[in-house]
Image: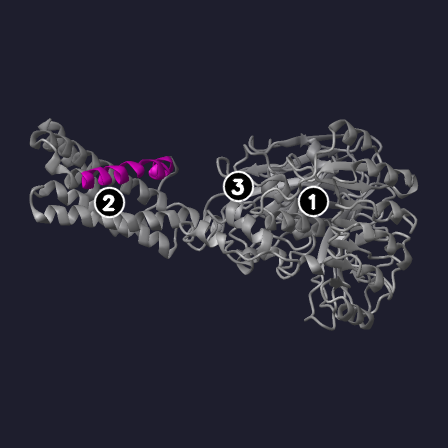
Amino acid sequence: MQRLQNFISNFVFFLLVLLGFLLIFESYVEVPFWLQPIGRMHPMLLHFPIALIVVMVLLDAFKSHLDHTSYQKVHAAALYLTVFTTALSAIMGFLLSKEEGYTSELMSLHKWVGVSVTYLIYILLLIDPQKLSYRILLYGSFIILFFAGHFGAGLTHGMDFLMEPIAAMSEPEITQETPIFQAFIDPILEEKCKGCHNPQKHKGDLDMSTYDLLLEGGEHGPVLIKGNSMESELIHRALLPMAMEEHMPPEGKPQLTDFELELLTAWIDSGADPEINIAGLNPEDTLFSLATYQMNLYNEKDTGPKYDFDFAEEKLIASLNNPYRSVVQQTPGSPALDVSIFVKQAYKDQYLKELTDIKNQLVSLNLSYMPVTDDDLVTIGKFQNLEILNLNNTNITNEGLQHLTGCINLTLLSLSGTKIELGIEEWLANLESLESVYLWNTRITDQQLDELKKQLPDIDFYLGYAADQEPPIQLTSPLLKNKSTVLMPGEEVILEHKLSGVTIRYTTDGTDPDSISSDLYQGPFKVQGYTRVKAFAFKDQWLTSDTIEYKVFTPGLTPKEIELQHPPDKEYPGRGTASLTDLEKGKASNFKGKEWLGFHGTPFEAIFDFGTEPAELSQLVFCYLVNTGSQIMSPLSVEILGGNDKQQMQLLSRKKLPEDHKNSPNEATAVVLEFEPSKYRYYQVKGRPVGKLPSWHNAKGKPGWLFVDELFFY
């Protein structure tokens, strides 16, 4: 036993000397990848010394109740085991702290408090357990251990983790005026993302603790692109297969639910405005529906069952569902039903009348864009438990509202795009539960709205965004509505903006558009070849949007055969040569997609055979990827050679590309090579990769990657 104790004592002494050495020369220490798994065992091992220190304190507190001989044996075993696991945990913690993202002040506190406990526990080996100094060190270590654990929990869960349940009890009710980011988006990020991306622990140099820092992004660039969820890393990484290393949140961490993903996507596509609230949204927007549902769910979570009526029979619900009508439970375990009727051309009033069989369970009814008339409101008036009624863009008038007096639980009524005008107050006054009325695009003016508010002060009326009452808000950039940036024959470029009344100006020559001389977007337009479409949106009393660029392509001439002279890296083989001409463009946010061919240490070289009767060519568009954080760089140069003999081809064009810099954006881009019109059978294309990454790169000196997807010949 004494030999084992001597061995542990000497080994721990060695570990503590090693730990001291590592701490002194910390700035020079780089942990090799094969040691990183040992560091990541720190969270698993540290529970042993914590528990053992507690055992040591309990042993000391109750030693008078134990046999002296038994106490000495148990104490010796516990002490040596505690010293050993504490020292080993400290070494592992140091290794883990050298990984990316652990550079905060909180990390420093946790490290030094933990190191203090480690050395204090070792000193216990050198002191007689009967002395007062031993007890002072033991209890002192126990107290310091509490702070080390608190700081460690703060790194993993945030500093508010301990008091979070108590703080949650005092959270205010969410209303339609609460910013959606504050109410729903930030809590999702808090639960699913901020554990690794906070001021204390910012993996990938990404801190998501505030909206501004979220926009700033991390070492790989922005994670959120306003108005474009599919190009936003935040959404793209969540959609990757779980097995992929880039998938976020990482495997083993709580994942985003389908609803959370849908809500994040809708918020980003709406412009990712941190101040927008439900009241400021058009009721037709997807974000409005999702946020309203979440608001109701949040405000009812602690109130118990909301409905006391019976469930509708499953067979009845099934019989009411058809291609033009959806009847679904509001939530699992709730008898409440949501109903939507759609396809304007197929609408029949019997679709409404048949709902009387579930009139007690019907709480939400969506009839937007249906040819509903005042007569149909007679049927709706029988739904006494109806809470939400969407009549947007229907044919109803003021007179029809008198039939809704039977909807005694109606809280939200949406009348946008209808013939409603001043005078509705006499009918709305009869709806005692009514809280919100939406009047977008109706005949009611701002002045008339003020009159309505005076007469019905308990109801919130919304006409949408009032530019004269609010500070200007910047418009989101126009969207490319086409499914792909590669246009099929005859397909035209389609731009759109979600907000009505917006004017779009654009250019197709690569220059920035302006509000005077640039083309006014009046409908789809044709392009030819490789075209850089730049566009922005503007509207009176709004801030002009940022200019956005879309690189679009039309199919060129397709070679008969393609011969790669160097195979792509086995990790990024794409679809082989098919990836070069399959008209499927790779995304900047997913370099592991099958569209990309990755080359490392070898250039891209391919010979394209256009057959014995080749058409005339005069332009090559070489598409490549830039993602400097992942060591994927622009090619140094691209060249094209041509000839009728593979062994004897002449240079047609060569272009040297500018070097990437530290802040180069991640993008799928292209370079154009012009050459004299020619009808050669063979064309050889070469892309020369970066041989050594520049001095500013964290992998300086290593060869860069070259990623290629589509090549277009015009």
Q: Residues within 10 Å of mark 3 (few under 14, many from 20)?
A: some
**Comes first in the chain, label 3 or label 1:** 3
Residue 122 x, y percent position in the rendering: 16, 43
**Residue 614 located left or right of residue 593:** right
Mark in front: 3 vs 2: 3
- Residue stretch in magenta: 35-58
**Comes first in the chain, label 3 or label 2:** 2
The residue shown at (24%, 45%) is 19
Q: Within the image, what quadrant is residue 54 found in?
A: top left
Mark in front: 1 vs 2: 2
Magenta stretch prevailing secondary structure: helix
**In the rendered structure, which amino acid carries the disc numbered 3?**
Pro
To which residue does mark 2 refer?
19
In the image, which disc is placed on residue 249? 3
Dot 1 falls on a residue whose secondary structure is: strand
In the image, which disc is placed on residue 622? 1
**In the rendered structure, which amino acid carries the disc numbered 1?**
Phe
Q: Give the position of the C terminus as an image quadrant.
A: top right
